[in-house]
Image (tube, rainbow, N blue to C red):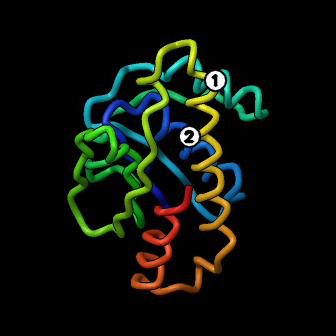
Amino acid sequence: MNILVLCTGNSARSILLEMLLDDLGQGRVTAYSAGSKPAGKVHPYALKLLEENDYDTSRLRSKSWDEFAGSDAPEMDIVITVCGSAAEEACPIWPGTPIRAHWGVEDPAAAPEDDWPGAFGTAYRILKKRTESFLAQPIETLDEGEIKALLSRIGRQV
């Protein structure tokens, strides 16, 4: 199951969720992340947090969703947006027919630098809990409607 995580900048939240899905999914899912207006680099505190949690960050980079729109790109089964609604951010819209879900989380990179540890920690905790909830289900045997309902329910977890 291929999952694309979208955010505007692809520097923090989408990167965190990509790593969580890949790691905790243990081959059940393959995660990618991208942005509609990529920052061009992964946020340094996102890298620090992931490295502190023993993730291999060597392959991470901020990338455009255009990489996943071409005919040679992997076909996506699910697209999850992670932009935060309270911040009134514009979420990217993904064309095509994958299952779409919204797992909004406030942007930790928008916090003042002194608040990064708490802001990134909160985003990571929420996304990890949602990832664990998703992967605890028999996703391989669920139909499209069941997956959509599951993703929607999980997207409301805090």
As drawn, 5 above or below 64: below
Instruction: Answer with the quarter of the image where residue 149 lies.
Output: bottom left
Task: State the residue in front, 35 or 133.
Answer: 133
Residue at the spot x=27%, y=45% of the render? 91
* Numbered marks: total: 2
Q: Which residue is mark 2?
A: 123
Which residue is under mark 1? 117
**Callout 1: SS:** helix
Q: Choose top left, top right, bottom left or bottom right for residue 157.
A: bottom right
The residue carrying pointer 1 sits among few (fewer than 14), some (14 to 19) or many (20 or more) residues within 10 Å by Cα, namely some
Mark 2, secondary structure of its residue: helix
Distance (Cα) linking label 1 and label 2: 10 Å
Q: At label 2, which amino acid type do we have?
A: Ala
Q: Please tell me whether residue 19 is drawn above or below residue 45 in the rendered image.
A: below
Label for residue 3? none
Q: Nearer the viewer, residue 62 or 12?
A: 12
